[in-house]
Image (cartoon, grey):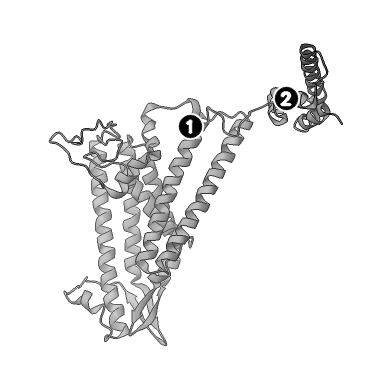
Amino acid sequence: MDMIDRYLNAVAAQLSADERADIIAELRDLILSRYEAREEELGRALTEDEQEEILHEIGHPLVVAGRYRKGPQALVGPELFPYWLFGVKAGLLILLAVQGLALLVRVLTGSGDAAQALSQSISALITGGVTLIGVATVAAAVIEHYGLRPKWLTQWRVKDLDAFGLADPSRWRAAMGGMSGRMGKDDSGTAATGGTGRKSAWFGSGLDWSGRGKRAWPGSEHLLSLVANGLFAAWWTGLIHAPGLMRISVHGAEAVVAGGPIWAALHTTILVYALARMAAALFGLLRPQAVRLLAVARIAVAAGGLWLAHLIFEARHWFTLSLGGESARIEGQLPLMLDGTLLAQLGDDGRSLADLAGNLGVVLSWGLALIALGLIWEMLAATWRLMRG
């Protein structure tokens, strides 16, 4: 088999059977005409190196076959690539925020060694990132291969463009850390460093692109709600674990905390509530201009939270504290009696298991009451926005 046949066989292997013969015949004629032209120029037959040089000029078999292949020539074409890049950047930032919060929960709850928790978070971040990029690439390849043109490629509106700031890391710094790394400002609120920072009003906030503006990104509330409720939903469904939350040190031993029947009865309802809060937060990020519709959604979600808080408090039996053969129920307390020595008593190993359960019941009752007050405030604030628009 001569050099031309090897070359053409490599090209033919990349082509469909129905068009292979015609293309290979056309390429053979092209190569032979190039050979003849070079031989006439040199006045002699070509050496193998000279023949191979001409084949190099024509191109690698994979590249040559690609010129004849029908359909897209890339997994992510030039028109789709900016959308793919935005999706990947935003997804990686969300994944980073979720893993950061998960790491914080593991460290604060003492769930294993801190170094081990960091290693697990990094591993999950890498695995999740690779999966995210792979899924985004496959989706883009399907769109390119079948020539799909989703509406968001052509039918977009200017008022919906605010959500694209999700791919800007500086906005996430403003949302997660306020104004960390703040530089000195003059009386007009501009940077006093001599730089010419570009300012871009996002939702009219006056936040600059560096994330060091005088006001935080208004979407930070929705972003943090989305991440926090997503983290809770992952814990509630068992995707992440915090075993330290269900154990308490008593008399030098670990008492086990078991959930009461109310949690099994409301498991699906609580999950739906968390997902509803995530949906409202996501809507706030994507459609910040829909003030009244967002206010209605927040009122409905907060009302659902108050109803859940009522059901939980009415159940009274929230947890059971067990140590050895002894057990005590942690129950809701009414009235909410909290004296000044209660928190100090929580660290006293001399009390009985029943006393500890009673103290924890009071503390959790206050926590539930504060959550209810927060939901009432959220409803009032959303009602005010609904009235004012």
Residue under label 1: 82
Residue type at mark 2? Glu
Q: Position of residue 170 (x, y in %)?
A: 33, 41
Rendering quarter of residue 289: top left
- The reply to whether residue 69 is in sight is no
**Quick one: label 1 or label 2, which is nearer the N terminus?**
2
Where is residue 387 shown, x and y percent of the image? 24, 38
From the image, which quarter does the N terminus lie in?
top right
Q: Is residue 105 visible?
A: yes
Q: Which residue is mark 2?
A: 53
Q: 35 left or right of 238?
A: right
Picture layout, residue 319 above or below residue 241: below
Residue at 38% across / 80% down in the picture? Answer: 255
Looking at the image, which is closer to me, 87 or 265? 87
Viewport quadrant of the C terminus: top left
| Amino acid on which disc 1 is placed | Pro
Along the viewing direction, whichever of 128 and 243 lies nearer the viewer: 128
Question: Camera-side residue: 217 or 52?
Answer: 52
Q: Position of residue 63 (x, y in %)?
A: 68, 28
**Disc nearest the viewer among 1 and 2:** 2
Whether residue 165 sits left or right of residue 24 in the image: it is left
Q: Which residue is painted at 12% across and 36% down in the image?
A: 187
Q: Is residue 126 above or below residue 186?
A: below
**Which labelled disc corresponds to residue 133?**
none
**Residue placed furthest toward the right:** 1
